[in-house]
Amino acid sequence: QVQLVESGGGLVQAGGSLRVSCAASGRTFSSYAMGWFRQAPGKEREFVAAISWSGGSTYYADSVKGRFTISRDNAKNMVYLQMNSLKPEDTAVYYCAAAPTIVPGTTDHEYDYWGQGTQVTVSS
């Protein structure tokens, strides 16, 4: 069982940076692949980034590649999403998710546990 709590969302101007964090509970956190998804108003939830259990492999949606960086600290049970060069189209609720797999997936049905989400708003 893994419980996830996101934090760090907020309002930022276009071109700015923001880091959202995900705190996980559970002694088996390091055995889970982790992902970030987002959902904008009126749109379906979409994959943003994922990281393997060891942190050795990362995956990104084309729309954020080169701007966002996912990382994890297994000693602290934390996952981070550093977002740079933010655009208004990045505005969404960002969700952290955990999957009991070695290789993280890019579809939400592959993830078993979800946080409550944190709002990120990018103004133009």
Image: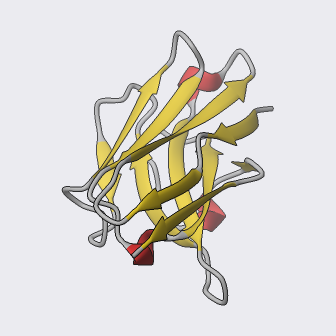
The color scheme shown is secondary structure
Point out the residue furthest to the left here: 66
92 to 101, vertically: above or below? below
Residue drawn at (46%, 30%) of the image: 53
Q: Position of residue 22 (x, y in %)?
A: 61, 36
Name the one closer to the observer, 115 or 112: 115
Q: Quadrant of the N terminus?
A: top right
Image position, residue 47 (x, y; %): 48, 66
Residue 83 lies, with reference to residue 41, above or below; the image says: above
> Residue 30: horizontal and vertical position, in percent?
55, 22
How many numbered circles does the render carry?
0
Give the left or right position of residue 101, taking residue 61 as reference: right
Q: Is residue 69 left or right of residue 51?
A: left
Q: Is residue 18 above or below residue 14?
A: above
* Rendering quarter of residue 39: bottom right
Residue 21 sits above or below residue 75 on the image: below
The reply to whether residue 89 is in sight is: yes
Q: Position of residue 85 (x, y in %)?
A: 26, 58
Q: Which of 73 and 81 is in front in this view?
A: 81
Residue 7 lies left or right of residue 12; in this view the side is: right
Instruction: Name the quadrant containing residue 65.
Output: bottom left
Quadrant assignment for the C terminus: bottom left
Residue at 51 percent of width and 32 percent of height? 79
Q: Would you identify the image quadrant in which residue 16 lies?
A: bottom left
Taking 113 as reference, is 37 left or right? left
Residue extending farthest to the bottom is 42
Kindly tell me whether residue 106 is visible in this rendering.
no
Residue drawn at x 73%, y 37% is 4
Between 118 and 108, the one nearer to me in the picture: 118
